[in-house]
Image (cartoon, helix red, strand yellow):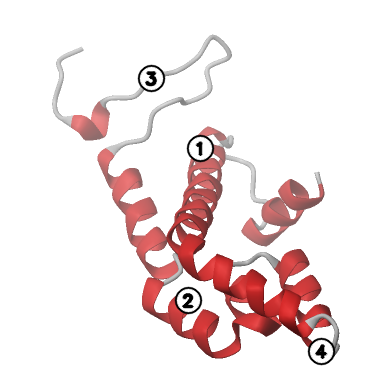
Amino acid sequence: MAYSGPDNMEKRNGAGNKLALSYRERMEIEFQLAGRKPRALEAYVRCIALGMFGAHRFYLGDRATGKRMLMLGLTVVGLPVSFAWALRDLFRLNALIEARTEAIYAELLAEALDKANRPEGDARDERTRRRERRTG
């Protein structure tokens, strides 16, 4: 078989599952990532304006820590602690954004590989597969 570009190049493991994605599939992932990844300016504004209530953590998808910061921020005793936590997060925000972006990319990559390895007759809904993967 002659090589005719990156679209026809694919690698498979011993079970016949696809390991590499085509150029088109990689570009689809990149476009989806660009639309879903958190924006740094918005995260910084949320951290500065409502950081002691965990708004930036909710924006970055870290709901558990956001809830803790919110509960601390609503109490008089916890407000200084939450303020110091938000100040620390202000300096770590780039790392938090990068971690969230990598998590989104991993999710999109898993979805693309799952879709590429799905048998032709499998007509399960995309939402059902995502739900199964989260609970899974």
Q: Is residue 106 above or below residue 73?
A: above
Position of the C terminus by quadrant: top right
Tag 1 and tag 4, C-beta contact below 8 Å: no
Q: Quadrant of residue 10?
A: top left
Q: Which mark is residue 113?
A: 1
Distance (Cα) linking label 2 and label 4 = 21 Å
Separation of residues labelled 3 and 4 (CA atoms)? 53 Å
**Label 4 sits on residue:** 74
For marks 3 and 4 on the same chain, the one whose residue lies earlier in the sequence: 3
Circle 1 or circle 4, nearest the eye = 4
Kindly identify the amino acid type of the residue bearing the numbered disc 1.
Leu
Which of the image's four quarters has the N terminus? Answer: top left
Residue at point 77%, 49% (across, down): 132
Residue beneath the point at 44% across and 65% down: 37
Residue type beneath disc 4:
Leu
Q: Which mark is residue 79?
A: none
Disc 2 to disc 3, C-alpha distance: 38 Å
Q: In the structure shown, which secondary structural element does the residue marked by tag 2 occupy? A: helix
Residue that carries the numbered disc 3 in the rendered image: 11
Residue 11 image position (x, y, % from top left): 38, 19
Distance of mark 2 from mark 1, alpha carbons? 30 Å
SS category of the residue bearing label 3: loop
Hey, what amino acid is under mark 3? Lys
Give the residue type that dot 2 points to.
Ala
- 60 to the left or right of 78: left
Q: Nearer the viewer, mark 3 or mark 4?
A: 4
- Residue 23, compared with residue 62, is above or below; it is above
Q: Do labels 1 and 3 touch, CB within 8 Å? A: no
